[in-house]
Image (cartoon, rainbow, N blue to C red):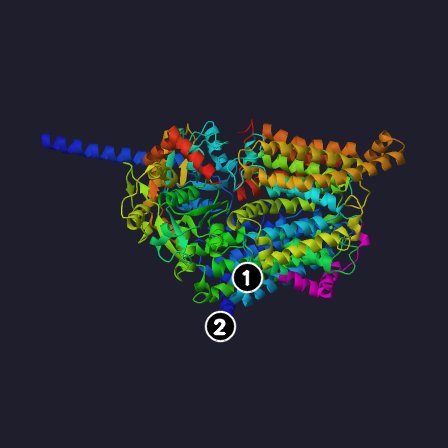
Amino acid sequence: MSMPTIIRSLLVAFLVATTLWAGCGVSEQEDFYAGKTIIVYVGRPPGSGADLAVRSFVRYWQKQIPGEPTMVVKNVPGGGGSRVWNLGWDKKNADGLEIFFSPVSATAIIIRQEGLRADLSKMPLVGALMSPNMTFARTERLKRAEDLPNVKGLKFGGQAPAHRFSILGRLTLDILDVDYRNVSGFQGASDVFNALRRREVDIQTAPLNFYRFTVEPSVVENGEVIPLWYNPVVDEDGELVPISEAGDIPSFVDYYEAVKGKAPEGELFEMYKVLLPHLNGIVYAAFVPPDSPVEAFEILRESFSKLTQDEAYRAEERKMFGFNLPVISSRQGTKIIDSMTHAPEHVRVFLEQYIQQGR
Amino acid sequence: MIDGMLAGLVLVFSWPTIVYLLLGVFVGMWIGAVPGLGGVVGLVLLLPFTYAMEPAPAFALLMGLYAVTSTSDTIPAIMLGIPGSVASQATILDGYPLAKKGQAARAFGAAYTVSAFGGVFGALVMAASLPVLLPIIFAFGLPEFLMLAVLGLTMVSALAGGSVTRGLAVAALGLWLTTVGYAETTVEPRFYLGIDYLLDGFRIVPIALGLFGIPELLEMAVKNTSISRVELSGTRDGAMLRGIKDVLKHRWLTVRSSLVGAYVGILPGLGGSIVDWIAYGHAVQSARDKSEFGSGDIRGVIAPEAANNSSRAGALIPTVAFGIPGSPGAAILLGALVIKGLQPGPDMLTFNLDLTFSMIWDIAFANILAAALLMLLSRHIVKIAFLPAHSVVPGVVVVLLMGAWVATSSMGDWWTCLGMGILGYAMKLGGWPRPPLILAFVLGTMIENNYQLTMQVYDGFDWMYQRPIVVCIEIAIVVTVFLAARGVSRPKSARIATAEDGAPATPLMSFALAVMLLALFVWVYFAAQAFEGVEAARFPVTILLVAIPVLLLVLVNDIVACSREIRNCGGFVPAWVSANERWHLRISLKFLGYLLAIPLVTYVAGQLVALPLFVVIYARSWGGFSWWTSLAYAAASLLLVWGLYASIMAMPLYPSLLFG
């Protein structure tokens, strides 16, 4: 047998073996979830925004998982949103058939809220979604966006004092040195918005999709409300980066520069930059229990990230949110969760005190 | 406008929209009739099926379900005295006594007729009111919501049986229960005793099911009486028709209650929870003869049932037209609109007017259809009222406990339900009214939030006399309290301190309850002093300002009544023995022991063992059924828990020690 023939034969054998091996891999992956049922736990009640978002995500996710397992969503609200994480943390003999997919409260993790026993930094993160948010104001006392720092006695409407929109809204107003009164305790973005329409509050921070679907068509187009800024995201190097989903709305940094004529600085702005990846980086996160099989985790992680290429899902997401929710990779998300869990003491103290001041 | 109405009508009757409407109605009837479920759960279940559908059939399916759950929730309210949902709380006040009198069919006839009328009337009124709705909605700010909630609470405390002082004390307890756990306005959990379940506070479903359901089950089990105290042969044929005639007789009450429902229903977050009480209060106050209210007056069924169906349309229109959801169910419908790529707002009244009208027609037809179907079905359902208790109790216990489990699917739901059951039983023995506790619980968070927000936004109390609507509501509150204090608006039957089934109340039990409540409120005072924030303590302490003086009055009253009872019986021991005999305390405690064993067995072996086991043991030892019958009953309950709750509803069952 001549050398080229041997080489050709070896090459063919290698290719066949590689194909078979790869085929085996696919088949093993398919075997793992084929005919099985994955339970997805959501820590919010049925019908809540988080519940609907997760249910929508899961419908497409199951098609991306080899073997196309059945996925069933179960609601386990409670404990200020902590119960679902505790449930995952306490899970013994995890078999890869349970996923815990719910909104993450950065403040609960950083200030070590009572009731949260789970250490999320030790639970494998399958993937996460980010939901951008923005701030807008009534035009009754604020004709142009750049007038904000000069108007006295405005009222900022927020949800619970520890809610991320309350903290982000107040922080940005404080950095701008706006004269405002904080009104906190509304039960949701809709409640704050209703108060805004009744002229009981003047400024609100809310999810970008809420702005697109509810605020823009009803009160922006007729000039009752104007957008002010959106809160940017922070990249892996700690730099503030713009998000395309906001369209022509300026980022907070751009807004600040436009009205103050210089870049933002100072202790509060530094804290804003520290807190931004925590408060703004992850909104919905999917974890599996700590000792889940590595194979299952890898399949789920891959399929989660593949969903970003699923055109059908992206189209539905655009219908639901007005844009595609930025996806946070498992690696990047794990880093963010880790930094929340191990936030420096001065950040924890600052956040605790800042929340107390917001009451 | 007319073109839009006709185009909407054509959409509803086009294929396959009409089929989906029928499907939604069938599912809604079933979900509404199971205690603990309801419109929101049903909408969440159906929502995924609508993703790939065209808008008109998708909304036909959702609206069909949404519109009729408040019609079929009348079944447990009338048959068992258990509110099927928040919307049917007031119905039990007169609906259940009617069932006890063997007049369940009459109550159903009236309830379904006014439900259909209310649903259609509400939809039409809302459609006609579109141009003026937005100013009405925005005329109600935080102070108006606060005062409306206080008005609702005042009405129920004054109207719902027992004495005014006991009513207020019970309302104070309900308000305090809402302060347990985290509040929106505070950052520290309150009164949660280190229990994770209580961090989010108590939930309405386990409280309502326990408070109303368990005492009735207990009485049925102990006395083995059917729900109806009248034999089937003693009831008249054509009772359903009699209910329909009652509606015709009280047609103006029906119209007025439907109007109340539609317009109170549009108020975001508030409407659905108090609309039935406001309508009930209106029925009592506008009646010349109030003597039968609380013991089986058909007007006490007509008013709340007309109002709660009408409020569904009231909540829908602002959702579609202005993007302002009036209730949690309406918020899900808003989500469904968005998923369909439709924007709530002016477009729905111009470009998509046909779709908006198709939704209004959906509500109207769903209500008529559900009423007709339920009238047919109820001819058979009413027969349950005449069955021996032992054949009904085990099944109802399973449904009741699984209904409570819907809240958060944790053992806290069961302990709350059972704890409330024991409290409800003690209240029943002591002649304390139970409805104020539920409404206070529903409104408590809203009252605290709106109070705190009002104080932040309006900076003082000027709003109390500067806002015309607030002043009008304040006048209504004062009139309600004044009339109640003079006994004018109170039903005659409610002015006597009786247990709710007409037997004399036990002053000893009333006294014991008052002492326990007083002790609780003293503890609340001291616990509140330890809170870090002033805001966290403000509302609980404000509750005490009313609760403690009122309880002292109750105590004085009870001490006098107890001394009289002891004197009449010839001493404390004979008085206790007499009360014991009258209320079958020993056997009652035995039944409660059976109930308390269910969660304990569940810890070890899970619900799929504990609940069927209870059914077998009860059917054998209490009901005297054969082994085969008992086992068949247990198998049916197992199928129900596994099939309906664990599989179809996808509810997580308890991970037991044995089976994980």
Locate residue B79, reporting x and y percent. 71, 49
Q: Is residue B338 above or below residue A77?
A: below
Residue beneath label 2, please? Answer: B3
Locate residue B82, reporting x and y percent. 68, 46
Query: Could you tell me if residue B52 is visible in this image?
Result: no
Q: Is residue B262 above or below residue A254?
A: below
Do circles 2 and 1 both sit on a common chain? yes
User: Which mark is first along the chain, 1 or 2?
Assistant: 2
The chain letter for the residue carrying disc 1 is B
Locate residue A10: give its quadrant.
top left
Residue B529's label in the rendered image is: none
Asked which secondary structure carries label 2, the reply is helix
- In the picture, measured across the screen, residue B83 lies left or right of residue B346, that is right
Q: Which residues are magenta?
A: B230-259
- Viewer-closest of A1 and B252: B252
The quadrant the N terminus of chain A occupies is: top left
- Viewer-closest of A87 and B51: A87
Indicate the amino acid at tag 1: Ile
Query: Could you tell me if residue A103 is visible in this image?
Result: yes
Extreme bottom residue here? B2
Q: Main secondary structure of the magenta part?
A: helix
